[in-house]
Image (cartoon, coloured by chain):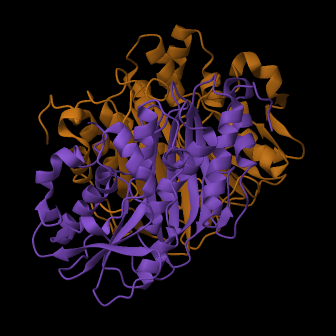
Chain colours: A orange, B purple
Amino acid sequence: MSGGNETVGELGEFGLIAAVTSRMPATEAVLLGPGDDAAVVRAADGRVVATTDLLIEGRHFRRDWSGALDVGHKAAAQNLADVAAMGAVPTALLVGLGAPADLPVAWAEELADGLREECALVGATVAGGDVVASPTVVISVTALGDLQGRAPVRRDGARPGDVVAVCGRLGWAAAGLAVLSRGFRSPRVLVEAHRRPQPPYAAGPQAAELGAHAMCDVSDGLVQDLGHIAAASGVAVDLDPDALEVPAPFRDVGNALGVDPLRWLLAGGEDHALAAAFGPQVALPEGWRVVGRVLEGAGVRVGGRDVGELSDLLGTGGFDHFR
Amino acid sequence: MSGGNETVGELGEFGLIAAVTSRMPATEAVLLGPGDDAAVVRAADGRVVATTDLLIEGRHFRRDWSGALDVGHKAAAQNLADVAAMGAVPTALLVGLGAPADLPVAWAEELADGLREECALVGATVAGGDVVASPTVVISVTALGDLQGRAPVRRDGARPGDVVAVCGRLGWAAAGLAVLSRGFRSPRVLVEAHRRPQPPYAAGPQAAELGAHAMCDVSDGLVQDLGHIAAASGVAVDLDPDALEVPAPFRDVGNALGVDPLRWLLAGGEDHALAAAFGPQVALPEGWRVVGRVLEGAGVRVGGRDVGELSDLLGTGGFDHFR
């Protein structure tokens, strides 16, 4: 552990790499970890699932709203959830950190701790990375995963007659962000949900085993992400608003902020729930709840109403990074 | 192709993703490309080589010094070279782009073209990525590769008695950067070397087949990168300065700028040559040249002199991102 006041500029690139990589455990899947030109990761079934995200300070996190530990958890979670959404089990992360020279070493170390702890939930670890100087904090995360012999669950396999089911929380992170944006720090359960999502990792491979026809993680909002499944599959999705239970903490906050909580449920991203289309005969295990069905047609409807009619409720209808 | 004046903010996130991914060819190794939660890439021998880099505008490239096509080539090259330095063949890239809303779409498209063209040199393609808003241009690249059944060539296997050999250019990118930094735009061959490195990709798997004991790519400077091999292997490396031929364009530029060209050869990074330690009996193929030998001891020497004695020549002795 470095002293609390040392900066990454004082420690230098190689000291920082050593401080961060020393915090990462070895795992059976990582055959060669940090310290060489590249890592070597087991890909037991002859394929590797791979996904990458960029997180930019001020856009995806604020250091005054989230601690480094939370940022590490969140950066790992959003990529591990993408792996799970293919029906795969994550094996390793690669992480790039762009840091101003005056960033405290302790911040980078806590970031590494958050990445490690989130990885540990699925048995993965950080296998490699890069550290560079940057005017603001930038974090890139690549997650790798193992399909364990299963076919990947893509977005384009939903069929009319399927049920649409969700596992994991919807709208909690968005409600927490709304709270923080108005200058509040509570309800704590919502603020924590924004800082640190809780994706249902095991439900991804589980859905694949159950023969899910299509799946994605809910990163941009349920309506928008199901819109991707609908478009890729050439079908329509009709959501049942009565099936979307409004969590208790949403009501008071919605009243206080003048927001219909249904908006967070339908358009709130970043909880990284899993949404999947299953054949109607599939007996869904605990944790999955049916929220709609797949029909002939195109687009996403809510209780039979076109999303366009709900634009007041949904705002922009989801997240566009440039808007 | 988009109009020359459209910005990524006007086109939006999903339009930009479509514009960029439409430029990427399908390959046999990419089983599922862009458009889902994650890509699926063939990893035929049950392992995957993986490496990642972050490039920050103003630090790793300048838009007034390098065109987007060059930046794409360079971003791909530095990661593909890391894969080659393990003895592997690259299969796919994942690319994150952080872009200001006023970035011309044409810049992003040319970046994608550069990535595609550099990947094509090794039969790889871009399998996935992420696009986000950022105050400055940020590019993250992750490269994946296939060891084709070979053992990875690590940094820690050099043995006393080995020869040290290099394949590829040394110091050209550094000389080109020195030229640009002084406000010049020629000699063109050096400026081009800075903008677009030419790593000897095929020499990586070749060295592995020849039984190289250790290998790395020269990204931070020959002395510094061989220092990593020396430290990891618990040996010393003695470079023969007479074996380092000073390229013709270096002499005039060195005179004009008051720089000993040997500095670029010994401490200049970013050409992504490959440096490797081979047993003394190995017959090195064309392209590889012996530049030193491995001895008992520690550290890197040049003609028997300790690197510390050469600090005037070497400057800081290599590259630290925070210094």
What residue is rendered at 31% in x and 37% in y? A69
What residue is rendered at 55% in x and 32% in y? B63
Specify the farthest residue to the right.
Answer: A297
Residue B163 drawn above or below residue B67: below
Q: Is residue B111 left or right of residue A302?
A: left
Specify the farthest residue to the bottom.
Answer: B281
Quadrant containing the N terminus of chain A in the rendered view:
top left
Residue A145 drawn above or below residue A229: below
Q: Is residue B171 left or right of residue B322?
A: right
**Residue A95 in picture, x, y percent from top left:** 40, 48
What residue is rendered at 59% in x and 45% in y? B70
Observer-nearest of B218 and B314: B314
What residue is rendered at 46% in x and 65% in y? B83
Observer-nearest of B100 and A318: B100
Asked if residue B268 can be seen in this view, the reply is yes
Q: Give residue B302's quadrant in the image.
A: bottom left
Asked if residue A284 can be seen in this view, the reply is no
